[in-house]
Amino acid sequence: MRLGVLDVGSNTVHLVVVDAHPGARPLPAASHKSVLRLMRYLEPDGSIGADGVEAILSAVSGAADAAREAGIDELLAFATSAIREAANGEAVLARVAEQTGVELQVLSGEDEARLTFLAVRRWYGWSADRILLFDIGGGSLEIAHGIDEFPDVARSLPLGAGRSTVAFLPDDPPAPGDVQRLREHAAEVLEGAVGEFGHLPSPDHVVGSSKTIRSLARLAGSTEEGVGSGERSILRRTGLDDWIPRLARIPADARPALPGITADRTFQIVAGAVVLSEAMRAFEVPELDVSPWALREGLILRRLDRLT
């Protein structure tokens, strides 16, 4: 079957079309992306402003048109933290359904963590044993830990790259003091979460997923020979910490000249790097593997499992 997965996130509205059937890996067939950066449209009361709502409607409408042109059999459409936590989130969902015909399923932060963990488990297989996962979105940081296809513990923390940029790094490039304030805030939030994972055995494999982490790995990581003809992408905390002050001194419009930093992530990449650094430090992780699969693949896999 041909599936479309529409991800309405804090930073982008991204449609991925895949050809898939049970027992086989999903094969990409088409893609359509619009940059939103919804955090810039948030009002003081926590609602999404009128311009932000119009941006969502335009992006979802364009993605729906692209999905129809691709000849999909089914559309899996979901929204994450930006709409989930907005004061007017329900009204925004209703307008999207009325004007575009797309009904968005709102995922909780724990749902995001569990589905991403499923994708990562399938990618690395059972030989990875116990996995600790970090996933940084625009609005939240997901952490999950377990040995099966669904984690023993899954948490979502308000440490997304976009959210952290708006709250702590208002200047471009950010002031060193603001970067330090974000680092201290992230450390404090993470300290409260680490204890919930303390009863679990040490992980055998630490994995990072999401576009933010993949971008940082291209910038500050390395590659090694992987299974078959593939490469294993690795990000070490020492390399990440070495890049953060240099990255923070570069204006956002110049960062896309760096390896891995795309225009849709350039404004929030510093905050994402700081949050990941503190997450690795809090969980005493010196390095992690970077997964090419994340939330969208988890949704596809769950849908295919239901077919069987």
Image (tube, grey):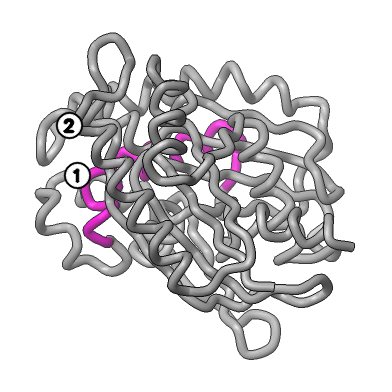
Give yes or no for residue 151 being in the magenta stretch.
no
Give whichever of 12, 265 is nearer the camera.
12
Image quadrant where one finds the C terminus: bottom right
- Mark 2: amino acid: Pro
- Residue most toward the bottom? 229
Horizontal relation, residue 200 to residue 38: left or right: right
In three-dimensional space, the C-alpha distance between marks 2 and 1, rounded to whole angstroms, equals: 8 Å
The location of residue 169, given as percent across then percent down, is 21, 30
- Residue at 74 percent across and 50 percent down: it is 131
Give yes or no for residue 268 being in the magenta stretch.
yes
Q: Earlier in the sequence, mark 2 or mark 1?
A: 2
The location of residue 123, given as percent across then percent down, is 71, 66
What range is drawn magenta here? 262-285
- Residue at 39 percent across and 31 percent down: it is 95
Assign a secondary structure to mark 1: helix
Give whichever of 268, 74 is nearer the camera.
74
